[in-house]
Image: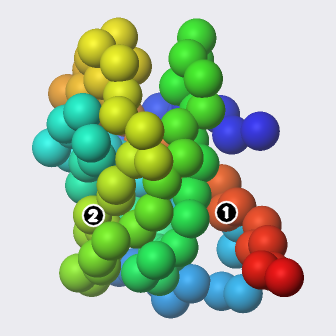
Amino acid sequence: MTTLTAAPMSDVDHVNVLAPETTTFRAVARHVTHDGCQFVFREAVPGPAQRLTLVLEGHSPVSGVVRWIVTDRAGFAFDHGLDAEAMAELSDRSALVSEIELQLEPVVAND
């Protein structure tokens, strides 16, 4: 299960390449909309088309996919649009420059 954590982003001066064992990413949400947002990653960065899940306290888990990556930033599309309360919670975290953890979803082979 993912958790919501808070930490300042001011000490970020580089981005590490995604390591194969990485399953948790720390990021700050920006430009939050009903359908997605931009994440600014603190350390490791997922790859394009990577599926991730985040948990906002008091809300159902939010799953989605990374659509694009530019250095430490990623466009993230939610599988299902956020309701107004979840969108406000994620936006409030952005205003506070709080980061959020996202969990790597297991890959399921198609039969």
Dot 2 crowding, Cα within 10 Å, few <14, some 14–19, many 20+:
some
Q: Amino acid at mark 2?
A: Gly
Instruction: Name the residue beneath numbered marker 2.
Output: 75
For the point 27% across and 64% down, the residue is 75
Pick whichever, 35 or 6, lies toward us. Answer: 35
For the point 61% across and 32% down, the residue is 61
Q: Which mark is residue 32?
A: none
Quadrant in which the C terminus is drawn: bottom right
Quadrant in which the N terminus is drawn: top right
Q: Using residue 50 as the reference point, say whether residue 48 is left or right of it.
A: left
For the point 58% across and 11% down, the residue is 58
Q: Using residue 77 as the reference point, say whether residue 110 is left or right of it.
A: right
For the point 56% across and 84% down, the residue is 18
Q: Position of residue 73 (x, y in %)?
A: 27, 69
Q: Amino acid at mark 1?
A: Leu
Instruction: Name the residue beneath numbered marker 1.
Output: 104
Residue 82 appears anywhere in the view: yes
Mark 1 to mark 2: distance in Å? 16 Å
- Tell me the SS state at disc 2: strand
